Image (cartoon, rainbow, N blue to C red):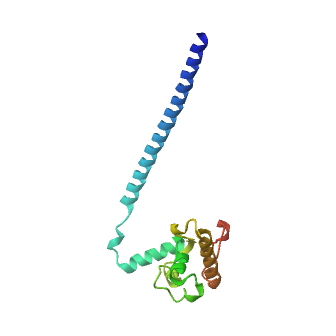
């Protein structure tokens, strides 16, 4: 009987310590969430109270301000599916489109990159889910090949970088 009682007590202690640990974790997470929410609200309200309504400024003044900001802080586009557009519209024939002249069928070309003062670009090797279990790997590699081709075609505009150290802003 003594062994059964000891086993029961150790089981209760085990579950009790687990519950205490879980409670502490839950309380810590809730406190962290409340602190993050409070900081977010405070920062948002603080920024709102100091900002002016730029929509009332004339367009040329807003463009001047935007250009000034972009000359000091590089704009980085984190998702561009131009390689997919090459695949979809011209069957990956990079040499069939002159990006320097502009390509009105897509969102990206060299004149718009320069006009928007784009500082860096992440190209997307996108393949439709329909390609799964068929030719998705080949399609993805084709997309990477397309990226390398137009980087090679326009070395004055694009540079293929694989590390953060490879890009100087």
Q: Is residue 124 above or below residue 13?
A: below
Residue 11 in picture, x, y percent from top left: 56, 22
Which residue lies most toward the left here?
A: 56
Q: Position of residue 78 (x, y in %)?
A: 53, 68
The residue shown at (48%, 43%) is 32
Q: Is residue 82 left or right of residue 47?
A: right
Query: Looking at the image, which is closer to me, 18 or 127?
Result: 127
The residue lying at 44 percent from left, 49 percent from top is 39
> Quick check: can you spot residue 53?
yes
Name, please, the residue furthest toward the top: 1
Where residue 97 sits, quadrant-wise, is bottom right
Q: Is residue 107 left or right of residue 157?
A: left
Q: Quadrant of the N terminus?
A: top right
**Outermost residue, front side:** 134
Quadrant (top left/top right/bottom left/bottom right) for the C terminus: bottom right
Q: Position of residue 14 (x, y in %)?
A: 57, 25
| Quarter of the view holding residue 13 | top right
- The residue sitting at 66% across, 69% down in the picture is 162
Rendered residue at 36%/70% (across/down): 54
Along the viewing direction, whichever of 78 and 128 lies nearer the viewer: 128
Question: Looking at the picture, how far across and down is residue 68, in whole percent?
Answer: 48, 75
User: In the rendered image of this protein, does residue 79 appear above or below residue 112?
Assistant: above
Residue 77 seen in the figure = no
Residue 121 in the image: above or below residue 154: above
Between residue 152 and residue 126, name the one nearer to us: 126
């Amino acid at each position: 009987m003594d062994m059964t009682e000891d086993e029961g007590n150790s089981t209760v202690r085990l579950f009790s310590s687990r519950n205490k640990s879980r409670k502490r974790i839950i309380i810590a997470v809730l406190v962290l969430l409340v602190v993050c929410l409070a900081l977010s609200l405070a920062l948002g309200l603080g920024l709102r109270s100091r900002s002016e309504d730029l929509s009332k400024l004339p367009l040329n003044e807003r463009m001047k301000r935007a250009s000034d900001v972009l000359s000091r802080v590089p704009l980085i586009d984190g998702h561009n599916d131009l390689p997919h557009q090459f695949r979809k519209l011209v069957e990956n024939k990079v040499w069939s489109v002159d990006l320097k002249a502009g390509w009105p069928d897509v969102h990206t070309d060299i004149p718009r990159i320069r006009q928007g003062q784009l500082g860096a670009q992440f190209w997307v090797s996108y393949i439709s889910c329909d390609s799964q279990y068929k030719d998705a790997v080949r399609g993805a590699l084709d997309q990477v090949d397309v990226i390398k081709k137009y980087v090679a075609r326009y070395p004055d505009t694009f540079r293929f970088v694989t590390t953060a150290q490879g890009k100087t802003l």
